Amino acid sequence: MERADIPLPEDYEGLKDAYETLRRRCEKTEAQLNQRLKVEEQLRESQERFEIIFNKSNVAHKIINRKLEILELNQALVDLLGYSKDEILGTKILDYTHPDFNDHWQELQTALWEEKVNQFELEGCLIRKDGSEAWVIVHTILFADQGEKYGYTLLEDITSRKQLEHHKDDFISVISHELKTPITSLKAQCQLMLRHLKAYEDGHADKMMSGIDKQINRLTRFIENLVTVSKIESSKLQPVLKHYQINELINEVIGEVQLTAPTRQIHVGFEHTLNLKGDPDKIYQALYNLLTNALKFSAKETAIEVTLKQQENWAVICIQDHGQGIPRESLERIFERFYKVDTASSLIEAGTGLGLYVSSEIIKHQNGKLWVDSEPGEGATFCFSLPLL
């Protein structure tokens, strides 16, 4: 018996095309579904990692809303403040902030939520439940979640470091003041001995005593820097306001420096005679530090240029040397306390890393600014500005 041919539908080709279209759509949908499942798995893993970091971290974390209310926090923040988690939830970090830091922190929070800045960092002090202080470095950013904005903050506990700095500052203060009395007495006796030797015209002994006097001056300046550092760190560097002429003060500093470096050339250029109101003794100390630094960091045969200009309502003083310059990686840290530029140059004398820090803080406390321009191998120019009278 012969097989009868089965007739094909008249729209066979159309059905075939429809099938292929449907198959491709199914494959595309399956691929999209697999991709979505993969993304969701990655998000789940990411969320788990975040929760582990957030909850288990030794650094305090918190999440706040636009009202600055704490919505989430980890155990580290509970331990830092000494309150229970339930007591902290719904409160604001400013509720625990030391009054000295409250206004500044509030200003930064306002700027962040108004999107004038995208993040901020500050060093502040919190008051624990037991009344003790907790010092922290605060890092805050904004982030979006489901159309809402939130603040994310890390609070790094630096209380131990601040306590160590406080003990160190106390030690520096005590040692500095204990040294001032014998140094003053030694200086007076040295001056008497110099006058006595000059009467006998003993050139060799006179030279030796002059060397001793030079080292006493150096030690005196070092002690003055230590005392100033102690005042800076304890917020006791209050300038004494007097009227003075900056031109005269610069000439006075140059005169003293050249007593200890008579062979060095120091060129002076004054465009104006400028009157200021501030603490001339502290500006003298800053100028002395900057000028002796310029001598220290440049060869003996090179000159130092000191200039004074008026720029609008500011007096701008610049001290330029022609030494080795400052490495680019050191420019941002040059004014930090105890920071010293790492260089193998034989021209560089050992230092304490206090001079520039002290000068910067002195000028800052008198509403001025200190900065430096330098290229390696081309010397350095330190400038500072002070408001005119």
Image (tube, rainbow, N blue to C red):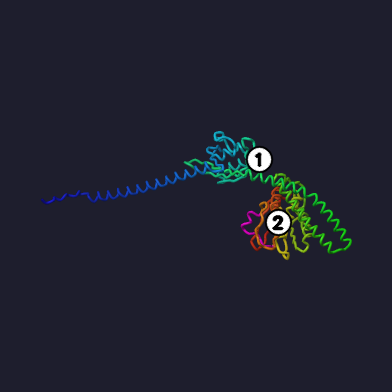
Pick whichever, 42 or 331, lies toward us.
42
Disc ID at residue 100 = 1
What is the magenta segment's predominant secondary structure? loop
Pick whichever, 337 or 376, lies toward us.
337
For marks 1 and 2 on the same chain, the one whose residue lies earlier in the sequence: 1
At label 2, the amino acid type is: Gly
**Residue extent of the magenta highlight:** 322-334
Residue 215 lies in the magenta stretch: no
Residue lying at the far bottom of the rendered structure: 301
Give the residue number, with chain letter if any, for mark 2. Answer: 351
**Label 2 neighbourhood size at 10 Å, few (<14), some (14-19), many (20+)?**
some
Q: Secondary structure at mark 2?
A: loop
**Label 1 neighbourhood size at 10 Å, few (<14), some (14-19), many (20+)?**
few
Residue lying at the far left of the rendered structure: 1
Relative to 152, is 368 on the left or the right? right
At label 1, the amino acid type is: Asp
Q: Secondary structure at mark 1?
A: helix
Foreground disc of the pair 1, 2: 2
Relative to 74, is 380 on the left or the right? right
Q: Is residue 101 visible?
A: yes
State the residue at coordinates (64%, 46%): 161
Relative to 281, is 89 on the left or the right? left
